[in-house]
Amino acid sequence: MLVSSPQMGNVHFFLQDLFERLGVDYLFPPPNSRRTVALGTRFAPEFACFPFKVTLGNFIEALEAGADTLVMVGGIGPCRFGYYAETQRRILQGLGYQFEMIIIEPPLAHPLLFYRALRRLCPSLPLFKIYREIRASFFKAQSFDFLEKRALEVRPVEMVKGETDKVLAQVFEELSRAKTEEEIVEARKKGFAKLEAIRTKGKPCLKVGLIGEFYLLLEPFANFGLERFLNQKGVFVERAVYVTDWIGPSSTNPVQGISNEEIARAAHPYLSHFVGGEGRATIGHIVTMTQKGFDGLIHLTPFTCMPELVAKSIFPKIQSDLDIPILSLIIDEHTEKTGFLTRIEAFLDLLAWRKNRKITPRSTFINWLSNKREKKLATYGIKRR
Amino acid sequence: MIIVGVPRALLYYYYFPFWKTFLESCGAKVILSPPTNKRLLEKGLELAESEICLPVKVFLGHVQSLISQVDFVLVPRVVKPERRSYSCPKLLGLPDMVKTLLPSPSALLFPLQDRDRKKEMAEEWFEVARKLKGLSFWKFKRAYWEALKAQKKAEKEKKRDFYPRNGGLKIGLVGHPYILNDTYITHSLVKRLRERGVYVYLSEEVESSQIRKATRKLPKPIFWSYEKELVGSALFWIQNKLIDGLIMVYSFGCGPDSLTQVLLETEAFKYGELPFLNLVFDEHTSEAGLLTRLEAFLDMLAWRKLNAS
Amino acid sequence: MDVYLGVDVGSVSTNLVLLDDEGEVITYEYLRTQGQPIRAVQEGLKRIYSRLSSNLVVKGCGSTGSARFLTAAVIGADVVKNEIISHALAALKFEPQVRTIFEIGGQDSKVTFLKDQVVVDFAMNTICAAGTGSFLDHQAARLGLPIESFSELALKAKKGVQIAGRCTVFAESDMIHRQQTGYPLEEIVYGLCQALVRNYLNNLLKGKPVNPPVVFQGGVAANKGMRRAFEEALGFPVVVPPYFNVMGAIGVALLTRTYIQKTGKDTNFKGFEIVDFAYATESFYCDGCSNNCEIAEIRQGKKILARWGSRCGKWEMGNLEESQVFSFL
């Protein structure tokens, strides 16, 4: 049995470690590429959302590379994500691949299915031992997240460009070698110290929050390395979701720092019910991040994503109440890197400008944007009517 | 007298008997928005987020048309129409979306409908009764009970267990009632099929016991209640060989349907390569394009049938 | 000589075909519709009439394409059939074992699957024109090239440039970018063909297996670059039939021939005189309800031939139903 899974941010650190502990052969999925997206788009239904297409592409590439068992997370809705695995299984079977799909259902909602999935993966291990290994592995995964979060704080103010990335890679390498709990704690401590030791200067010029759909936030390929891009421009970034917060059972979100209840409370005046996915969290994060004094927010959503669309419908009201700039970007297989980053750059200019002026006359901003647009059009020789 | 407006869109097609009975026993007058027309749709397009699905856009148009004539607009929040299965994220957030559009939020009634939280649901409907200044607690209880009964009765009346064995073409039409019954956005699809002598099976006519039986074998339960009904009814027709072809109708941007489409397609293929047509509606769907697809599909079915006999 | 006439009026082109008693093509005519379907039909009939001796006896005529009902009212068609079935019938004539038909027209594209000479499945482009001929037309205009030159240029290219061609507008900006980075013209042209093929395969096929023989028809099949791109993408040869651009008309003429021969009915054909008739199309808004439907009507002199466009059906006139002729196949 050679197991593989989709690619999403740091999740492979967790899975690799976990499967090693459980004694299962794990095939690293080939990294996301244009080909992954092309394959996914080709075989996915036309109106499926972007993460569906990329993960389908991951599966195809993993099967091509020799995997015979695919692991995917299930769910109980109402977001489409919960039904990904089953649909992808059908599509892949239709394409004639021989494989087994193991769907990890949430243990509380489907205890039996969850148990069966575990038993398929490691038939002989006693249950308490599996539990112990998952816990240890989860602890390690959390350490990755904490370190990554710390790097987000250091990177915008690093003195030598690229130093943080170098250090972070080294730290991750050391941490992934750690096995026992003591080793992990040790590696983590060392990692923090190394990140602390990076020479910094000044303060970040802007504080920007990243909110929206979790796959797009977590997978750098899908968001065109947005975090790094912002950090390199000297912008402090806070991300709304981390891998272990997302897979973890607790609602306190230890890495992110805001519990689900707090988010729900913050969102309540605008969205008083959960709507699946990260819909309510998006609204909640807008409120809390505004209170924390963020300069602006970037909202990422896949095309036709249901929960994010509900949230997005509420943006006009929330923006007029809180007076916070939000750039909402839709990502799908057609999104182009240059166009995407151009919008981000313009947004950063706007934020910086707004911050320096202290006042934010909306009309001036609109004028400025339309000037910029006209200039750009003029370079193509197009005049506006 | 207090006037309550009910938009003739989305969940109206599921729960109107319940709402009407309840509101009227609260002493309110219920008025409906007119059937979807061009003006309503245009209004909806103006109000809604551009990528959202057509039924929601239509719904917003209906709400807009009611606001000026009524005291309250009823937009219930339907969370779980059945136990352990949701409606859809957009329906969960519908009241919140409408709220951002309305000038005064007090003009909106959005009681909960949730089979897993019956007590909360009754409380919220009691709140509605209180707002309409109608009822004491006991009277409310009776009204609520009668409304639920009326709903059950209406649902039962829709069920049919007549399956013509021979004769012309028989087609299973899979689609949400709020799309199929809206003759404006579907260009009277159902009527057109019937005019051509096709016997049309509709999902809402299938007994829920049959649906449960048909979906039991699915490797993973479907967690959207309305989709479960659609898929279950389609599987029922397919498994019992009642139909010559399957048409799936959904609106552009419908999340659940975009995935269940794969399910139905593979199942239809498994059972004797049953012809499958997928019709996607949005505000730009033209009548000509629809007709061409439909005619070609019917021709294909007739041709296949001829070849088989 | 007994002949059968098939007329296919689409949004971009209008095609007429004459078949003889055996179902062989006598002559055909391919014109641009240019937004005037009736004029195009009249012009086509005139050309055919002037080319052939006058001892033709039209035994039957049929219409297809998006303007099939309008055309039927003008020529008096015996058979009205949608273009998917018409194309399939024509393809079966030239390639009896055909399993897959690719058809790319100006505004729409289709794929049809057959098994044992019966259509078993088909798909049309849903909401996007990115997989249709108008995509290439747009880009040709943007490059300042006639679309006819694409064929030659695309065949010259060693390889195609990767162009993200999902949507006409995006593809345009991407193409301009490639131009600015100095790629040779023929590689850009071939890249556009590949983009169209990719779109077509992505949007319509969705992983459904493509079984050979594959017939590629429709106006876009004139572009040899497209054929090359299809063959490269699929990995096996693709057949372009001899009358690839008038296949719809051939199909409906074949159907008419079968229908007339089997029923022995007389044709409703109004004769070649109609080329001189004056037709007037007019439209008005009905104010019966808030839909304000636009009603279109076509008149010959004072006589109303057909009327359509109302949602409620109160204005509908003339034969707007397709012929049920399947028992004659």
Image (cartoon, coloured by chain):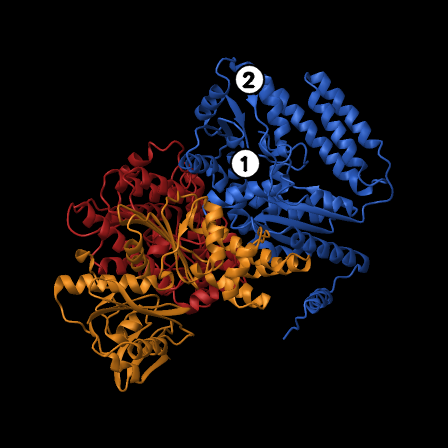
Measured as percent of width and height from the top left, residue B175 is found at 35, 50
Q: Residue placed farthest to the front in the image?
A: C53
Residue at the image point whose x is 53% and y is 53% from the top = C195
Along the line of sight, which residue is nearer the eye, B64 or A332?
Answer: A332
- In the figure, what tint was chain A given? blue
Tag 1: residue type? Asn
Measured as percent of width and height from the top left, residue C224 is found at 47, 57
Tag 2: residue type? Ile
Q: Chain of mark 2?
A: A
Q: Chain of mark 1?
A: A
Chain in red in the render: B
Q: Residue placed farthest to the bottom in the image?
A: C302
Residue at the image point whose x is 55% and y is 60% from the top = C153
The dot on residue A130 is 2
Relative to residue B217, is residue A58 drawn left or right? right
Q: Mark 1 falls on what kind of element?
A: helix
Residue A355 higher or lower than B258, as above or below: below
Measured as percent of width and height from the top left, residue C128 is found at 47, 58
- Residue position for label 1: A58
Q: Residue placed farthest to the left in the image?
A: C264
Quadrant of the rendering where the N terminus of chain B is positioned: bottom left
- In the figure, what tint was chain C given? orange
User: Looking at the image, can residue C81 be seen?
Assistant: no
Residue at the image point whose x is 51% and y is 35% from the top = A60
